[in-house]
Image (cartoon, rainbow, N blue to C red):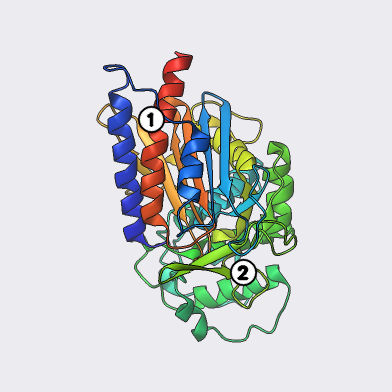
Amino acid sequence: MHRSFMLAVLLAVVSCIAASAQEDAAAVEQPATLQEVAQSFAERRDVAAVGILTLVEGEQEIATAGLRRVNDGDPVTPEDRWHLGSNSKAMTATLIAVLVEQGVLSWDSRPAELIGAGDAEVHQGFADATLLDLLRHRSGVAAFTDGNDFQKLPDFGVEDDSELRLAFSRWLLANPPAVEHGEFLYSNAGYGMAACMAELATGRSWMELMDMELFAPLGIEAAYGWPALEDEAQPWGHLLVLTSLVEHDPHSEYQLGPLIAPAGDISLSLADMGKFLALHLQQSSASPLISAENMQVLHEASGDYACGWIAGTDNTGNTFYSHDGSAGTFYCRAILAPAKQSAVAIVVNRGAADGMMEEIFNAVIPLVIARRQEGS
């Protein structure tokens, strides 16, 4: 997603903070239910389905409404998967933290040394870039956030996903950096390179590592690519063309592909998304997967960007994290409030829905505040 979208998300978080700060000073009117919120938005003509997850002090609530496909009558269910887009970045970054915890990688590991080993050419501008720089978008690696970026790539002559990421990463490192090392440039390619480093360090593919080292311990069953790519009963993505929704065939030529899959090509159910968010709410305490120290590294921002999260601070000093994700056919927003032990995820099966995210988010926040008051 583009940086302007990210800043819009940060403003949404500030709105959340302002509302939360008032919860102890005034009673909150009894709001609608989460299901009613989901239903009200799903009834609009500009979206097929809506899903909402709230996580408050360890308790999940999920609401879904609408259709898996606008031209089909099957309703979405709480068990359905949604494409998370760039919210996949926080997941790939968390995998990296697990590997750092295991001693397989270091935050200071350098792509120039690991990927550029042997005869591989590395531009001097990447000499000091680290794995952590890749995750914070400060390595200088080109963006690859636009389809036109891929038109300049050579034929790498390999088909295996891991080999493609290695060839891509070496090509990136051989060319001049897009910006100077240390300067922010939001980069899907940087996350592909981080995954390549994990693959080289372990001898296992990114998907295998995600499944075995992160998702399985959390009880998560992920899909890669569009939700309906292997199971057409899952939700389809949609494009908004003028005022009409058009289904995106999950088997069409438009796929993110392996080069940037680690940056944005994971699909999860809302319940599984909740398990991942719950891990990140354990910010100051160790989990079986990640120590408090390494979780702190994940959440420590350089500027306003951490490892797959945008960080914002409210007027009481509490830090909130957020991120939007969309590859054009689904849209997902995730927000973490560790100090409040609360999280929200909102998903729709339509692209270009950042404005709708704001509306749904504003309707959900009073429900989160009410649940926190009930539990206090």
Hey, which quadrant is residue 16 in on the image? top left
In-front residue for pair 45/321 = 45
Across and down, in percent, residue 8 comes to 32, 52
| Label 1 SS | helix
**Three-letter code for the amino acid on which mark 1 is drawn:** Pro
The residue carrying pointer 2 sits among few (fewer than 14), some (14 to 19) or many (20 or more) residues within 10 Å by Cα, namely few
Hey, which quadrant is residue 227 in on the image? bottom right
In the displayed structure, does residue 16 sit left or right of residue 191?
left
Which residue lies most toward the top here?
Answer: 376
Report the residue marked by disc 2: 117
Across and down, in percent, residue 320 comes to 38, 37
The residue carrying pointer 1 sits among few (fewer than 14), some (14 to 19) or many (20 or more) residues within 10 Å by Cα, namely many
Report the residue marked by disc 1: 366
**What residue is at 72 percent from the left and 77 percent from the top?**
159
In the displayed structure, does residue 229 sit left or right of residue 12?
right
In the displayed structure, does residue 192 sit left or right of residue 365?
right
Q: Quadrant of the C terminus?
A: top left
Q: Quadrant of the N terminus?
A: bottom left
164 up-or-down from 199: above or below:
below
Whether residue 337 is visible to the viewer of this picture, yes or no, is yes
**What residue is at 56 percent from the left and 46 percent from the top?**
65
